[in-house]
Image: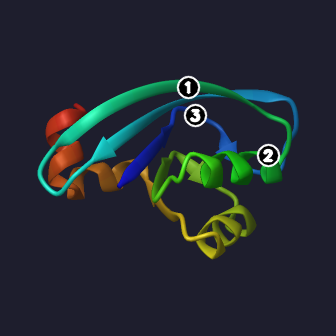
């Protein structure tokens, strides 16, 4: 499974021309196997959605997200979670100090 942590304080919406630092975690059932860093230029929400599909991301953690963008991601098969939900995931909770 691949989990993306979108490290952005602002709301993920359909705004243009912004960069988003991202950490991608490759996770199995018991541990984090690999960590990638990436920075994308968010041209629009479709560009971000395409990035998620290309990277085969299963889950994404965000600070805040527009409800329409959440629905789009979920229709693409990407589970959207909030940063607070990291506490509920034992693998992420051990890996990342929140």
The x, y position of residue 47, in whole percent, is 79, 46
Dot 2 and dot 1 residues touching (CB under 8 Å): no
> Going from the N terminus, do you reach mark 3 or mark 2 first?
3
Q: Nearer the viewer, mark 3 or mark 2?
A: 2
Q: Earlier in the sequence, mark 2 or mark 1?
A: 1
Q: Which mark is residue 47?
A: 2
Which of 51 and 9 lies nearest the eye of the viewer?
51
> Is 98 on the left or on the right of 84, as rendered?
left
* Quadrant in which residue 59 is drawn: bottom left
Find disc 3 in the rendering and name its residue. Answer: 9
| C-alpha distance separating marks 3 and 2 | 19 Å
Above or below for 60 versus 16: below
Q: Position of residue 82 (x, y in %)?
A: 44, 54
| Label 2 neighbour load within 10 Å: few <14, some 14-19, many 20+ | few
Q: Give the number of the disc on residue 38.
A: 1
Mark 3 vs mark 1: give the one in front: 1
- Assign a secondary structure to mark 3: loop
């Amino acid at each position: 499974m691949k989990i993306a942590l979108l490290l952005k304080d602002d709301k993920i919406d359909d705004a243009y021309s912004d960069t988003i630092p991202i950490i991608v975690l490759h996770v199995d059932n018991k541990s984090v196997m690999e960590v990638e860093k990436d920075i994308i230029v968010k041209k629009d929400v479709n560009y971000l959605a395409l990035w998620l599909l290309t990277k085969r991301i299963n889950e994404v953690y965000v600070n805040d997200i527009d409800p329409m963008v959440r629905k789009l991601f979920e229709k693409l098969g990407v589970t959207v979670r909030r940063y607070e939900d990291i506490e509920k995931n034992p693998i992420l909770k051990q890996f990342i100090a929140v």
